[in-house]
Image (spheres, rainbow, N blue to C red):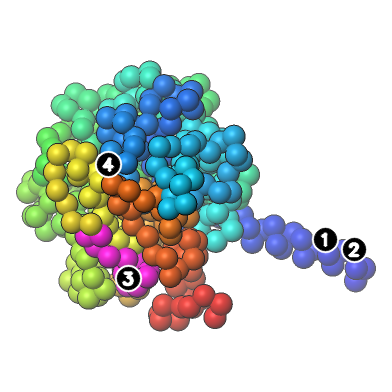
Amino acid sequence: MPRLLVLSLLSAVTLHAQVVDTSTLTGKVVCGYQGWFRCEGDGSNNGWHHYAADDKFEPGHAHIEMWPDVSELPPQDRVATPFKYVDGSPAEVFSSVRESTAQLHFKWMRDYGIDGVFLQRFATTTRDKRFREPMDQVLAHCQAAAKANGRGWTLMYDLSGIKEGGIQLVIEDWKRLTTEKRLDLQSSAYFKHHGKPLVALWGLGFNDRAPMLEEWSALISFLRDDPEFGGCAIMLGVPYYWRTLDHDCIKDPKLHELIARADIVSPWAVGRLGTPQDAASRGEKILKPDIAWCAEHNLDYLPVIFPGFSWQNLSKSRGQEAKFDQIPRRGGEFLWSQALAAKQAGAQMLYVAMFDELDEGTAIFKTENHPPVGESRFLSEPDLPNDHYLWLTGTLGKLLRGETSDAMPKRGQ
């Protein structure tokens, strides 16, 4: 065989290996992607949105628990802050509305073998043009970056804060996005499931909000069955105790009827467990029965796993107190234990919360292991490389697909 043809074939194989099969969520490891960080001067006019609660982003006034590593961004897209490193140099952050941010984040996903993201879109903010337009920018940048880097993505509406009658906001926003061609459901980068474009709806059935089951039913019907705007597969983000209708879940059995109409169910696990021992126990007592219920109702199951949790700075900004490093990461052992428990329970897909969630300390992207010093305290693991959780999350895909052993691997082995 001619050498040029061999090289061409090898190149094609390499390229194929770098492109995620978006025709199904089965076998995939995806992350939640907030995309909600704004900076003074980034053009969004949203101030320091999510970096600070009151637009006063300075030592003692932070909304985040980890400090992002922005060293790979172009200098013009790094935003200086009043925070300082130990040597006195200014600490910089990123804006989610910048195209370079999305491109870098999706490049990291490609580099470390993470299949893609669920882009969060907060329904309550779609009514206000000041917040909707920056969200549209983030959507456009993520859509382009996913395609450029061979990753998958899907849109997830977060319905937190929705009042009765508010479900219509989602319907109107969906119509606008699809009519104006801002959202390309047929793109090779957009996740499909069972042959249909996948849309995620998060927040059904939690007992800290109005149930609105009839409105949720109408929304599911619209996205599934509307002759012009429907034809979608549905993922529902539900409480951790959705099956037993207790703890964080409403007690109405009609919830199960709604869940059975979806294609995928994804229970929210953040804060519901805190140790590897918890993960093993919940795998047996909760995930296995959950997956059995789903099998009976022809549903797929997308368990949520998370690396750790901390929100001391966020809580302080709300006038509350919280323990620092509330759920320790244990060098990745906690994240791995959840993935292993999910696999052993029968899960065939995983959702990692989250890619870029700095607020509650669940981010898996690159963060500073030597963060700014001063009045605000930030999580760090200086004994680990700053890409450790990107690498580990990519390795979870191999665990899920049976391409590596159940033991948590070490770098370089």
> Residue 4: which disc?
2
User: Height in image: 248 above or below 174?
Assistant: below
Q: How crowded is mark 2: few (under 14 residues within 10 Å), some or many (20 or more)?
A: few
User: CB under 8 Å between callouts 1 and 2?
Assistant: yes
Name the residue furthest right: 2
> Residue 330: which disc?
3
> Which of the marked residues, 3 or 2, is nearer the chain's N terminus?
2
Examine the structure image and report whether residue 326 is included in the region drawn in magenta.
yes
User: Height in image: 260 above or below 133?
Assistant: below
Query: Visible in this render: residue 2?
Result: yes
Instruction: Give the left or right position of residue 50, taking residue 412 as reference.
Output: left
Q: Residues within 10 Å of mark 4 (few under 14, many from 20)?
A: some
Q: Residue at x 71, y 63 (%)?
A: 13
Q: What residue sits right under mark 4 in the picture?
A: 60
Which callout, 1 or 4, points to the residue nearer the camera? 4
Quarter in which the N terminus is drawn: bottom right
Q: What residue sits right under mark 1 in the picture?
A: 8
> Residue 88: which disc?
none
> Which of the marked residues, 4 or 2, is nearer the chain's N terminus?
2
Query: Visible in this render: residue 204?
Result: no
Q: Residues within 10 Å of mark 3 (few under 14, many from 20)?
A: few
Q: Is mark 2 on a helix, strand or loop?
A: helix
Which callout, 4 or 2, points to the residue nearer the camera? 4
Percent x, y of residue 87: 47, 52
Q: Residue at x 37, y 70 (%)?
A: 331
> Which of the marked residues, 1 or 4, is nearer the chain's N terminus?
1
Q: Residue at x 44, y 63 (%)?
A: 389
Q: What element carries label 3?
A: helix
Q: Which amino acid does label 1 sit on?
A: Ser
Q: What residue type is labelled 2?
A: Leu
